[in-house]
């Protein structure tokens, strides 16, 4: 490897390297506590909503750095309505789930309409949504807490309560074999897919990365999956919420990477005029981004009330900031057109690790906010400056 | 002989790959109105940008001698400090500020921490009176017309104690009455204030009316300076100076493939400006293009050619579009770009960075963007196929890039243009509208683009080429329309066309004179 390749590698994988450094720092400071199986498992459960929301937020940001400020309030509102339906109105759980999904999607479509077709700036529309749905949550709940502890099916399904792990079919006590097995299967599938795609490309004489890098990457990612599965197996197994997160990540990863619609999100953010003149309906792209955000906010809403086994008018506060932060830390461009689902996941994990690590170290909650703010700013400065070829100050 | 106020000596300015100015000399006497004329791209605006410090000292060669001193302007503030004020073709006024605020923007009266609004108003009034604008200085710019805005610009320049005023196409967006008023104001300022002006204009009747001297620039060099009363000031004489150049073999040999079938016909086409809904930018245009034909649309910048093309291409420009559009004899209504592409129409934009390409994306993604369906099954993109398509076009068009994974932002202008052409060729159109296909690219790449155009018509496609470069139009087209101020003012067969004929059509029709379509 020559110097350029090393620099290129560093630039491409900056956030992964930062994540490793941060992880190493916290395992040192917490005496390894952050890597305990229980904490790894908690990292997933606590941050599930961030993964889901950040994936949706990525689509909005891709269209041109547009953000959705309303997601925190929508999460709260959907949860409030769902809890009220299930507990106060005795609506059957499956019907309540459908209602929540429809409600979230409808809210997204409502905001998307103004943004896409009337071209009201997204910042304004979603700021209004943030106020409206926070207020409505209070109205629906009468300012009170509604407990959904008794709705065990719902709570377990969306990863809350005590029994929120996938049942171990092998029934061994200490090590959850189902989890370990799942991890190994996932690794095997990953390796097979990677190798087959590579051989296909090679057969057609397309460019392939050099064999050494390919193997290193393959081994590294496989190792991460296996270790991760092993850690979870040592705790209580696969948290149900991880299944939801995986579905969201895989589906959206596929959409953004392999479908025409996914391509449109990038194109609009890269150059809207050129996209329009290529015969693509850009209004629809914006509409889709925000409608989808509402849909995923509904899912996050369900995850949130399940985890906390109740609905309260204060839930979901600052969730939008977690999602936006994860996207930018994960390499999404503040001008749109650039960003990937895996990148965003790395960003979200990094935020999660910083949170968890500082909590374990006993850092004051206010200081945690300071650190997160600094990390976010640093990440975006890095992104902008590196794209300008390393020039820090713009000439007037 | 009066005192020489400004002398520009041996000015040479190079941009990467292009020599925009080559040893230009210009002498302006105090108290005269000096006109600069020349074709688009001849270098007039570049010369004025050098003079006003937009291209700072050190980025060009040669000397600027102003008022007896050699000047080294670092930016526009320096030149304004000496009394050289430039008024650009696109007016630089802020619509939601008042006339007075605009006049003193960046030059505010009072102190840094307290603007003196009384002084601002009084001074504004004083200069508005000089230029004869009766509207209150508290009127917002958005509420006055373009003609009055032009007067505000002049008042603003005077308020900076201008001694040398440069006007770049001041009448291009004015009607005849406003233009006349503006020219008379220039004469009045010359007489009463002794103001020296340089005017850049394509309207030769105006130039002859107002100027004391005319300097002709062609291909980045000064050709001649004509003096009123000494030389012939007629339009024909000026045109001769502007276009007198030889066509060399910069164009590939062409065979003619023009068929009988009319591929596309536009009838009584009218388009209004999207923002100023009373301004008509395309007026009663009738054109047609045949199978296998290269049709040229010639004209000056701002003639309405791009607006015509984009309004035809799925109404992507303009409001209140009326007229009929026929493709292969069938009347069609193309309301969206999707419709246009479906009817096998393609528009390759003049602004490849702004409207054409996604610079941050690789060649392969740009190549397939207008026809993603062709590389996907049920909305899932076949990335291998996409890659193969991109490689295919890269080889076919000889695009120079390390691979199709390269971001188009890193390519040269000529190669970007090829990617843009590839994108539209992949959309498999029958009719391609190429808007300034060779703007800003070097001679070699131009030649290759011409070859591609010839290949396209040989395959039976029709090409409509919009170009401001007359040699290119003459060298490439089977038939030529001349457009000016929103109208088609002439039609020529490629064999009979000359630069003089085209320029005559344009210049005779300028200034809102009615000219019949042949």
Image (cartoon, rainbow, N blue to C red):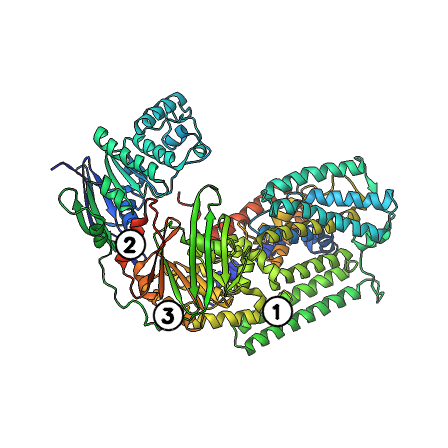
| B228 displayed left or right of B445 | left
What chain is tagged by disc 3? B
Report whether residue A152 is seen: yes
Query: Which quarter of the rendering shows the N terminus of chain B?
Result: top left
Residue at point 61% right, 69% down? A218
Residue at point 58% right, 73% down? A198
- Kindly give the residue lying farthest to the top in the view shown: B118
Report whether residue A29 is seen: no
What chain is tagged by disc 1? A
Are the two marked residues, 1 and 2, in contact with CB atoms closer than 8 angstroms? no
Which badge, 2 or 3, is on the more N-terminal residue?
3
Cα distance in 3D space between marks 2 and 3 = 26 Å
Are the two marked residues, 2 and 3, in contact with CB atoms closer than 8 angstroms? no
Residue at point 83% right, 52% down? A95
Residue matched to label 3: B451
Q: Position of residue A22 (x, y in %)?
A: 60, 53
- Which label number is shown at residue B503? 2
Q: Position of residue B121 (x, y in %)?
A: 38, 23
Query: Which quarter of the rendering shows the C terminus of chain B?
Result: bottom left
To the question of a shared chain for discs 1 and 2, the answer is: no
Cα distance in 3D space between marks 1 and 2 = 66 Å
| A113 displayed left or right of B249 | right
To the question of a shared chain for discs 3 and 1, the answer is: no
Element under label 2?
Answer: helix
Residue matched to label 1: A218
Query: Label 1: few (<14), some or many (≥20) within 10 Å?
Result: some
What chain is tagged by disc 2? B
Residue at point 35% right, 28% down? B133
């Amino acid at each position: 490897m020559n110097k350029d390749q090393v620099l290129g590698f560093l630039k491409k994988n900056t956030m992964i390297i930062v994540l490793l450094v941060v992880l190493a720092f916290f395992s040192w400071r917490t005496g390894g506590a952050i890597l305990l199986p229980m904490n790894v498992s908690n990292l997933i459960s606590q941050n599930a909503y961030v993964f889901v929301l950040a994936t949706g937020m990525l689509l909005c940001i891709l269209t041109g750095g547009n953000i959705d400020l309303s997601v925190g309030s929508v999460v709260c509102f959907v949860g409030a309505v769902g809890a009220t339906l299930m507990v106060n109105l005795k609506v059957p759980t499956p019907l309540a789930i459908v209602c929540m999904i429809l409600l979230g999607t409808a809210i997204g479509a409502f905001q998307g309409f103004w943004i896409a077709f009337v071209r009201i700036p997204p910042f304004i529309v979603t700021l209004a949504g943030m106020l409206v749905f926070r207020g409505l949550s209070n109205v629906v709940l009468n300012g009170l807490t509604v407990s959904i502890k008794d709705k065990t099916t719902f709570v377990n399904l969306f990863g809350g309560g005590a029994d929120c792990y996938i049942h171990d079919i092998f029934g061994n006590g200490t090590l959850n074999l189902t989890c370990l097995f799942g991890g190994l299967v996932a690794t095997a599938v990953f390796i097979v897919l990677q190798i087959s795609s590579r051989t296909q490309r090679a057969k057609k004489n397309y460019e392939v990365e050099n064999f050494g890098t390919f193997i290193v990457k393959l081994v590294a990612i496989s190792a991460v999956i296996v270790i991760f599965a092993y850690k979870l197996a040592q705790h209580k197994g696969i948290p149900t919420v991880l299944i939801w997160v995986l579905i969201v990540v895989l589906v959206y990863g596929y959409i953004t990477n392999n479908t025409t619609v996914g391509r449109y999100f990038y194109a609009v953010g890269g150059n809207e005029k050129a996209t329009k003149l290529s015969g693509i309906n850009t209004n629809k792209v914006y509409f889709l981004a925000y409608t989808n955000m509402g849909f995923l906010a509904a899912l996050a809403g369900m995850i949130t009330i399940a985890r906390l086994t109740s609905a309260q008018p204060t839930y979901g506060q600052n969730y939008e900031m977690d999602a936006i932060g994860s996207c930018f830390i994960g390499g999404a461009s503040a001008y749109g057109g650039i960003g990937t689902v895996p990148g965003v996941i790395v960003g979200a994990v990094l935020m999660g690790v910083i949170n968890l690590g500082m909590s374990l170290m006993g850092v004051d909650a206010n200081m945690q906010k300071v650190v997160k703010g600094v990390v976010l700013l640093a990440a975006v400065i890095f992104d902008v400056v590196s794209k300008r070829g390393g020039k820090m100050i713009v000439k007037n | 002989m009066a005192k020489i106020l400004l002398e520009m000596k041996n000015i040479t300015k190079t941009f990467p790959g292009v020599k925009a100015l080559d040893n230009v000399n210009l002498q302006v006497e105090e108290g005269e109105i000096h006109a600069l004329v020349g074709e688009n791209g001849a270098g007039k605006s570049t010369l004025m940008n050098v003079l006003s410090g937009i291209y700072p000292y050190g980025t060009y060669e040669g000397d600027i001698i102003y008022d007896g001193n050699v000047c080294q302007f670092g930016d526009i503030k320096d030149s304004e400090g000496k009394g050289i004020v430039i008024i650009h073709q696109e007016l630089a006024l802020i619509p939601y500020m008042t006339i007075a605020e605009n006049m003193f923007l960046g030059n505010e009266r009072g102190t840094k921490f307290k603007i003196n609004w009384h002084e601002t108003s009084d001074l504004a009034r004083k200069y508005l009176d000089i230029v004869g604008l009766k509207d209150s200085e508290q009127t917002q710019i958005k509420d006055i017309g373009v003609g009055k805005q032009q007067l505000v610009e002049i008042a603003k320049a005077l308020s900076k104690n201008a001694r040398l005023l440069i006007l770049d196409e001041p009448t291009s967006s004015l009607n005849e009455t406003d233009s006349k008023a503006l020219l008379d104001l220039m004469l009045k300022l010359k007489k009463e204030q002794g103001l020296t002006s340089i005017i850049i204009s394509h309207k030769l009747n105006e130039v002859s009316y107002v100027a004391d001297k005319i300097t002709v620039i062609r291909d980045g060099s000064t050709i001649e300076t004509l003096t009123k009363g000494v030389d012939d000031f007629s339009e024909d004489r000026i045109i001769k100076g502007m276009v007198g150049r030889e066509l060399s073999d910069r164009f590939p040999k062409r065979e003619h493939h023009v068929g009988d079938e009319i591929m596309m016909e536009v009838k009584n086409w009218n388009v209004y400006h999207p923002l100023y809904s009373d301004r008509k930018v395309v007026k009663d245009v009738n054109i047609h293009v045949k199978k296998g034909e290269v049709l040229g649309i010639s004209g000056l910048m701002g003639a309405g050619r791009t607006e015509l093309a984009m309004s035809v291409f799925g109404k992507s420009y303009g409001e209140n579009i009326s007229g009929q559009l026929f493709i292969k004899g069938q009347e069609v209504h193309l309301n969206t770009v999707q419709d246009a592409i479906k009817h096998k129409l393609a528009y390759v934009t003049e602004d490849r960075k702004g409207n054409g390409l996604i610079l941050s994306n690789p060649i392969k993604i740009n190549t397939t963007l207008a026809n993603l369906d062709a590389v996907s099954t049920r909305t899932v993109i076949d990335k291998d196929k996409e890659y193969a398509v991109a490689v295919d076009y890269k080889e076919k068009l000889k695009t120079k890039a390390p691979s199709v994974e390269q971001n188009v932002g890193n390519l040269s202008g000529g190669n970007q243009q090829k990617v843009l052409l590839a994108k539209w060729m992949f959309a498999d159109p029958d009719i391609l509208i190429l808007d300034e296909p060779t703007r800003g690219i070097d001679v070699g790449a131009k030649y290759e683009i011409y070859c591609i155009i010839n290949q396209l018509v040989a395959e039976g496609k029709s090409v409509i080429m919009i170009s401001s470069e007359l040699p290119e139009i003459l060298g490439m087209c089977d038939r030529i329309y001349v457009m000016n101020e929103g109208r088609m003012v002439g039609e020529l067969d490629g064999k009979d066309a000359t630069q003089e004929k085209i320029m005559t059509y344009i210049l005779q029709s300028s200034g809102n004179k009615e000219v019949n379509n042949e």
